[in-house]
Amino acid sequence: MPINVLMPALSPTMEKGNLAKWLKKEGDAIKSGDVIAEIETDKATMEVEAVDEGVLAKILVAEGTADVPVNELIALIAGEGEDPGSIQARAGGAAESAKTAPVEPKGTPDENAAPGGGHASYARVDTAPEGAKPGGVAHPAEAGGRVFSSPLARRIAKQGGVDITAVKGSGPRGRVVAKDVQSAIEGGTAKVGAAPAKAAEAPKPAAPAPKPASGGAPAGLTLEQVKGFYEKGAYEEVPLDGMRKTIAKRLTEAMQVAPHFYLTVDCELDALMKLRETLNASSGKDKDGKPLFKLSVNDFVIKAMGVALTRVPTANAVWAEDRILRFKHAEVGVAVAIDGGLFTPVIRKADQKTLSAISGEMKDFAARARAKKLKPEEYQGGVTSVSNLGMFGIKHFTAVINPPQSTILAVGAGEKRVVVKDGAPAVVQAMTCTLSCDHRVLDGALGAELISAFKGLIENPMGMLV
């Protein structure tokens, strides 16, 4: 019985992935632990390891295929004693294999891991996905079965009144792609309600939506309606990648579901800047003569947020529908901007780590985030996050909570300000910080207690070191 290779679920929220590259070809011997493919998720490119031994008999999803659903069969491995050449993909098994295949996560499972996480890989079955045919040839649809088509193809078909089940696909495994639907529209075939042999009229272009009197656009507009507000040629259409889709979906849900409220404080930085200078001057040198560490203001902010959460333990919690999960240690995410989006790697046990350890960890996270080499377990979870836009000269802003976290701290630029001390004007260096809170977890007084603890640590930074 062949071993079923499924599209793995590389994170709890992953629904589809792109099969970027096969690192093994049909006929190759495979050992447990071999890396056989690269999968692109919304945030990173991940390597998939084999958990069984055998020979790669059939590749059912070609490399470069996008939006492959989790648990869809992508290849077959011949087990011990099986003839790879005799293994054929038979139709009708994708749905069943998704139901019965056990999930085998890579590495030791985390007792606090979210359901659906881990690295689902293989299970022994004797069926193949719906629509697959012997020899690896696939058809876009069976009678009453699933249509393999791209989201863009489905949207064009809907707008053009085309029956997509009657369109012949030219993509991998017979997948219907946008150019197939366009050809059907131009050829007048596959129209809903029309006989296939008859030529149908070309669909009329969608009428632009009328502009509202206020000049604004109502919510929930279709693509064609939005485009109707602007002159042709005045813009460039940029398709959404997986990361931008995920950011849009999750943060829209966050604003709709989590009731946000905001608390703002000004933090004086004079004592922190002096301590930072002293600590950086005390750093040893490596063999190349470079400092072993160089602390940033952001490193102090992360440490202060971690310690503040443990000093206000009721705030060190997240919402979990019918209960609140309260944590023993502080897990602080840090927003790292990359082209087209951002990552939020998490500093685990930030309350216990030294400033130099936090600094080194953040430098490593930032470098790998920009290369999209972070592992899902490195950017998932966390109780709070820090978003620092001070380097861009931003003085004050509010940030959107990243679910399931319950808070996020927006940090502005440090600058010299005139304040009143002991009844006289004085110049200090200060920054403005705003804490966004999920009101389901934190009430106003609790949020105020947390950000006050943070302010106290920033203004008296020696408290972080003892």
Image (cartoon, rainbow, N blue to C red):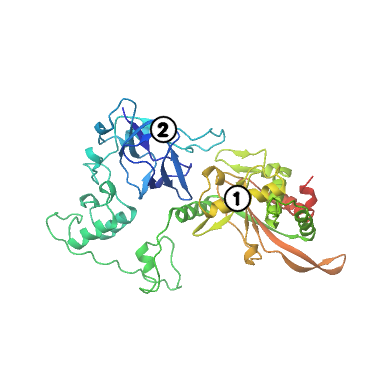
Left or right, residue 399 beside residue 463:
left
In this rendering, which labeled residue sits more in front, label 2 or label 1? 2
User: What SS does tag 2 mark?
Assistant: loop
Q: Which corner quadrant holds the C terminus?
A: top right
Residue at 52%, 38% in the rendered image = 114
CA–CA distance between discs 2 and 1?
Answer: 31 Å
Residue at 23%, 64% in the rendered image = 203
In front of the other: 402 or 53: 53
Q: Using the image, determine if residue 414 lies above or below residue 313.
A: below
Residue 337 location, quadrant: bottom right
Q: Using the image, determine if residue 268 lies above or below residue 376.
A: below
Q: What residue did someone put label 2 on?
A: 31
* Residue 217 location (% of width, % of height): 43, 67
What amino acid is labelled 2 in the image?
Lys
What amino acid is labelled 1 in the image?
Asp
Q: Using the image, determine if residue 333 lies above or below residue 188.
A: above
Q: Which corner quadrant holds the N terminus?
A: top left
Q: What residue did someone put label 1 on?
A: 364
Instruction: Judge whether residue 445 can be spotted in this image.
Output: no
Residue at 32%, 33% in the rendered image = 96
* Residue 357 location (% of width, % of height): 68, 46
